[in-house]
């Protein structure tokens, strides 16, 4: 992929080649052909190369084409606040729900929040419902077609998977993935595996084809979960879950977008003036002077505002390509570009924030919160 | 306790003093006074010093006296066959059930059997029901008043305890108790803690006073479980469980009585001729010759046949004391003694084995076996 002429190729994956060659993640390009061949719609993140790899996603899509029971699953740690990094995953869920008619499951990782992150129970439960579930609904996920659940409230067959899986992973395998091996991490990791695998059980609908959209950093866990599916086969017939791998949106300083870095992270609940200030201070691919930029052009690959466009703030591919070219040619300078970005971001935030109060009520109504 | 004149003091506990002094296990003698004072019956194993220590058993008994909800809980690993070592625990359950009117819970440790011992699921489930539950019923535990359950079939609040407790024990605490820390051991240990603690939850009857009859070797786990009850108090109000500590019956060679040592272990299902042979070959406290034995007397403390009497084959304390004296005085020689022991053991085995077929049917009827 030639960086200089690819408007989608701005976010680079560290060790991308290694993921493909060593760990067996498949490149996503063949999937696009498969989708086209099957007449299935392709999502914005697929088109733009944000989703760059997969495991067995072809098998998942073939099953969807055959009309078999299929599900997409993700999990959220109920800590901090919902931001644009989380939105990337929710956008994918919405694609599966609306475009492919696939069942959506969302795990609320309150067990892990308590045991590993030491977040008080009441706080984790409130944050899970009001911050995460409500935001997903406000973003457009259909609450009637989505199964949100708390890890501590999921029923016996789910927990049985945790118990049985505990005998199918060795201490050294575990240490290779997680570094050390505390009781809290052991239970959390096995719980995550159960999150992915349990929807295949008849008790939870028997969704025998599952896909999990993740970042590349989560692949070691995905490999373990796929191995567990195979190792448990003597007792339980489980398909290996599929995965897609996406690049991560950067924070506004070019670092990580994260709740712990609020100055560089756009939260859905940011007051508009706060969000505007963050955006105006964002790191761009601009040059030292306007004169220089007109002469040399900007570098969208280095620009966190361009990241916002790329990940969905600009929906039209044509418009995105135009912005890319105008930046590179030196025609579009950063000040003007940021003001334009703000008009889009402001509209987006305003619309979502209008929906949030009702979405919170819906969230409390549909989610079964644990008693302790 | 002077060994030479105590017919109950034959089985010595290694590090007994250390348990009492270092780890805070309380001697059982004060409990006998308490029972007498409250007009509560005392069991054979209590009278004979087989139960030698406790933690907070006085609090448990006070609660029973006040008529509060109280339960006794034990667990069995569904591997191997039911033998006289297991009977010791069941006799205690029967005492609680009949004499104190205390609710009985029995955990069938199928999760641990699978994950740690690698016993196939179907085998573990069958052994749990046909070998363990059935034997307990045949021994006289009332199936209508006992809650037998599989660890893999216990419902959400039970598992929630496992998840929450995982955050309340450190890696080094765990290693100090269990040596190393594999995923299987972590989950099994936390599951055992949930076994003990979950009956306090309202969902399982709210038995706020729990006693667990155990061998001294299980005390480290009991300490951890009591600590967990305290550490979880921010989220869940749990009383620290009580424990009683019993001596273990020896195998017929003076070593451990265990399924893995069938030549020295009396199983409930032993054919009578097999049981008789084992008994006749048992290690006794006899002297090299009959002449010497008549002169010096036998040593009941060293005799595994005397162990059988002590642990319940002889019910009358007077008779037990008489046998003890006749052995020590050289009046009762080993051949005659073994023949007498066999008349008692044969009657016991015959009676239990007659009951086993119906007990097995009852067992399958009342136990909710996991689906996978």
Image (tube, coloured by chain):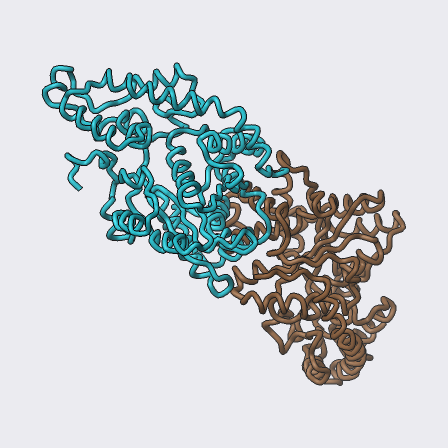
Chain colours: A brown, B cyan
Q: Is residue A261 above or below residue B19?
A: below
The location of residue B124, given as percent across then percent down, is: 53, 33
The location of residue A17, given as percent across then percent down, is: 67, 53
Q: Residue at x 26, y 33 (%)?
A: B317
Q: Is residue A26 above or below residue A321?
A: above
- Camera sees residue A100: yes
Locate the N terminus of chain A by quadrant.
Answer: bottom right
- Horizontal side of residue A320 vs B78, given as left or right: right
Q: Nearer the viewer, residue B288 or B50?
A: B50
Q: Residue at x 64, y 44 (%)?
A: A226
- Quarter assignment of residue A341: bottom right
Q: Is residue A6 above or below residue A33?
A: below
- Horizontal side of residue A357 vs A22, given as left or right: right
The location of residue B360, given as percent across then percent down, is: 54, 28
Q: Residue at x 48, y 45 (%)?
A: B188
- Quarter assignment of residue A354: bottom right
- Horizontal side of residue B59 vs A369, given as left or right: left
The location of residue B77, given as percent across then percent down, is: 47, 36
- Camera sees residue A245: no
Q: Residue at x 79, y 62 (%)?
A: A142
Q: Nearer the viewer, residue B343 or A293?
A: B343
């Amino acid at each position: 992929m030639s960086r200089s002429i690819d408007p989608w190729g701005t976010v680079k994956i560290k060790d991308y080649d290694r993921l493909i060659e060593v760990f067996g993640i498949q490149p996503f390009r063949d999937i696009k052909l498969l989708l086209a061949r099957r007449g299935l719609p392709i999502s914005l993140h697929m088109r733009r190369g944000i989703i760059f790899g997969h495991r067995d996603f072809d098998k998942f899509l073939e099953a969807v084409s055959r009309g078999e029971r299929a599900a997409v699953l993700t999990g959220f740690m109920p800590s901090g606040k919902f931001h644009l990094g989380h939105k990337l995953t929710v956008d994918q869920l919405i694609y599966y729900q609306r475009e492919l008619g696939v069942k959506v499951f969302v795990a609320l990782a309150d067990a892990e929040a308590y045991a590993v992150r030491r977040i008080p129970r009441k706080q984790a439960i409130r944050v899970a419902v009001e911050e995460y579930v409500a935001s997903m609904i406000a973003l457009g996920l259909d609450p009637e077609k989505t199964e949100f659940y708390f890890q501590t409230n999921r029923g016996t067959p789910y927990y049985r998977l945790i118990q049985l899986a505990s005998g199918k992973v060795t201490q050294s395998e575990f240490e290779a993935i997680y570094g050390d091996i505390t009781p809290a991490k052991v239970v959390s990791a096995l719980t995550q595996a159960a999150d992915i695998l349990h929807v295949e059980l008849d008790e939870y609908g028997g969704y025998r084809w599952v896909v999990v959209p993740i970042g590349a950093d989560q692949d070691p866990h995905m490999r373990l979960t796929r191995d567990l599916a195979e190792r448990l086969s003597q007792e339980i017939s489980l398909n290996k879950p599929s995965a897609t791998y996406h690049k991560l949106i950067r924070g506004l300083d070019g670092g990580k977008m994260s709740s712990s870095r609020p100055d560089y992270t756009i939260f859905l609940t940011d007051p508009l003036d706060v969000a505007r200030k963050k955006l105006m201070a964002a790191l761009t691919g601009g040059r030292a002077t306007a004169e220089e930029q007109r002469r040399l052009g900007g570098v969208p690959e280095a620009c966190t505002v361009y990241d916002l466009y790329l990940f969905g703030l600009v929906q039209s591919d044509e418009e995105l390509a135009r912005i890319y070219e105008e930046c590179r040619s030196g025609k579009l300078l950063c000040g003007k570009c940021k003001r334009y970005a703000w008009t889009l971001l402001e509209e987006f935030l305003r619309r979502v924030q209008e929906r949030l109060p009702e979405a919170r009520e819906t969230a409390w109504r549909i989610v079964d919160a644990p008693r302790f």
